Amino acid sequence: MVKNGHRVFRFVLPLVVAFGPIWSSSMAQDLSKTPLPEGLVAKETAPAPAAVVCFLEGPAVDAVGNVFFSDIAGNRILKMDAKGVVTTFRADSGRTNGNCFDAEGRLISCEGGEQGPGRRRMVRTDMKTGEVTVLTDHFEKKRYNSPNDCCVDAKGRIWFTDPRYGADRSDLEMDVEGVYCIDNGNVKRMLTQKEIDRPNGIAVAPDDKILYVIDSHPKEGGNRKIWAFDLAADGSLSKQRVAYDFGKARGGDGMRIDMNGNIWVAAGINKARGNPGESLDVPAGVYVISPEGKLLGRIPIAEDLITNVAFGGPERKTLYVTAGRTLYRFPVMVSGFAAYPPLDRK
């Protein structure tokens, strides 16, 4: 039997070698330049999404390495444990977008109104008991637009942005897309269209003296900037200035700050999506910007749409990135800043 097997092998091998050059010649063609099948589809045919079943956002990492992140389209919050196992943390998320932890390890979530009906409020989850507390669901008796992203400062104040990106604005009750601060249960509107076009990502610096807000409006001529504001001890903001300007391309979405004060921002796009005035000059990736506004570099992300980032893992030296249908991660050489968990300085 072994001899027969050897004879079969000798017989097949020359056929593989003989036909090899034909296959190689076929594979050597640049198929990316293959034209549309003439007469079978219309000229300029380009497939468009028929349904979006997963759109990831808002990563946040707890003390044991669990990563919580939102699937807005799926209306759920997912959880990936330290071993990489993904489960559903909350099946009905109220269209949660951004998430972060406060200093006590409670999960703060922005329940939005994008990609389907949502609860349009800010909530806090006690991770020990599972109890959900509504922090705010109205401002001046009007429902929020679609709470988008959040952060917590050193005094425990919760900052959140409230834009609306969906085309359907028929259910909006206010004409302001603002930035808000929750301080001991009291909600104050801090920024309006006097200072910002459309607020998105938000983060506070490690020294608690600067608040960064991403201003991302897809309209022609709209802002694609990161603003910096001096943050006073009483929570007031002053000295608005540009930290970085992405020009006419898709600007930033979500961001986090490292312990050196550098901004790590999810920004850019790989393929045009038809927004007026939005160029492809900023390819998708994580852009790292110094406190002085210098671009330090970019980590490319091949998938659209890149949405947000979060530091986690030992010494907070892993960056997690949400983009499209995928949660990415890569090691970094500087610790990230977060209100929780405490950074081990041993």
Image (spheres, helix red, strand yellow):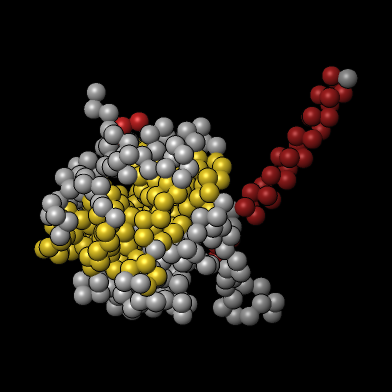
* Observer able to see residue 186: yes
Q: In the drawing, does residue 112 fall left or right of residue 205?
A: right
Q: Could you say where residue 101 lies in the image, as x and y percent from the top left?
A: 35, 44
Instruction: Give the vertical position of 214 relative to 340 (above or below).
Output: below
Q: Quadrant of the N terminus?
A: top right
Tell me which corner region of the image, top left, top right, bottom left or bottom right, holds residue 188: bottom left
Q: Could you say where residue 285 lies in the image, as x and y percent from the top left?
A: 37, 54
Instruction: Give the vertical position of 329 relative to 233 (above or below).
Output: above
Looking at this view, is 249 or 126 the one in front? Answer: 126
Q: Residue furthest top?
A: 2
**Residue at the spot x=24%, y=23% of the render?**
346
Total marks drawn? 0
Tell me which corner region of the image, top left, top right, bottom left or bottom right, holds residue 214: bottom left
**Residue at the spot x=69%, y=50% of the render?**
22
**Residue at the spot x=36%, y=56% of the render?**
135
Instruction: Give the vertical position of 66 relative to 278 (above or below).
Output: above
Looking at this view, is 159 or 325 the one in front? Answer: 159
Q: In the drawing, does residue 308 fall left or right of residue 226?
A: right
**Residue at the spot x=34%, y=42% of the render?**
311
Q: In the drawing, does residue 62 fall left or right of residue 205?
A: right
* Observer able to see residue 248: no
